[in-house]
Amino acid sequence: MKSVMASLATAVFAISGCLTGATMANATQANGIRYTEIGTGAAPVSVKADLARALANSAITNEICYSVHISNVGWSQSYCNGETVGDYHNQIEAIVMAVSPDFGEVQYRAHVENIGWQGWVSNGAVAGTQGQALRMEAMQAELYNTAEPNRTISYRVYLPNQGAWDPVEHNGQVAGTTGLGWPITALWVYVS
């Protein structure tokens, strides 16, 4: 437990350092997770701290954790390895993801209402938008720099316009829709 708490304290320090101007190299060396601040903006420190806490408290190695920004709600708590996040009613507007430090890295992107596909972001950066009331309509995710190159990242989104879950997608495939204006209201991500 003491080791987990020390790791968590280091992770929170490193995350805070990223947001206050510390170099990415220092953050990577401090906790093994590089939080790349590109795309539509930085995730709040509380969201990154929650991701670090979820990964540190997990009994599963090679795990992925994620949090979403939900319309009319704000940022969710972190969920990990296949847990469903979202309420099936309010649109998801953004997502952040991180994998266990000993595993590798994750990159992902979002297709957003009135914007289209955004650029790829990684390791705790925001894909989507915050505070603009723009729905996420599709997503893609990939693993890279992994210790085990045969690993698969799988993800699935719930589309209320269909009243059902979209098929499970893997390794960079598109989950959701483009050009239909359909929101995502729940999702899960899993690494195997």
Image: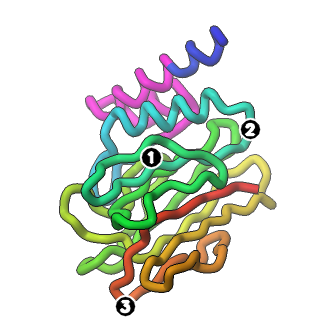
The magenta span reads: 9-34
User: Does 18 lie within the magenta span?
Assistant: yes
Which of 114 and 88 lies nearest the eye of the viewer?
A: 88
Circle 1 packing at 10 Å, graded few (<14), some (14-19), many (20+), is many
Disc 2 or 1, which lies upstream in sequence? 2
Q: Residue beneath label 3, please?
A: 179
**Which tag is nearer the camera, tag 3 or tag 1?**
3
Amino acid found under the numbered disc labelled 1: Gly
Q: CA distance from mark 2 to mark 3?
A: 37 Å
Q: Position of residue 170 (x, y in %)?
A: 67, 71
User: Does 178 lie within the magenta span?
Assistant: no
Q: Secondary structure at mark 2?
A: loop
| Residue at horizontal 56 percent and vertical 34 percent from the top | 54
Amino acid found under the numbered disc labelled 2: Thr
Q: CA distance from mark 3 to mark 1?
A: 27 Å
| Residue at horizontal 30 percent and vertical 34 percent from the top | 19
Q: Residue beneath label 1, please?
A: 124
Q: Residue beneath label 2, please?
A: 61
Rendered position, 45 above or below 160: above
The prevailing secondary structure element of the residues shown in magenta is helix
Amino acid found under the numbered disc labelled 3: Gly
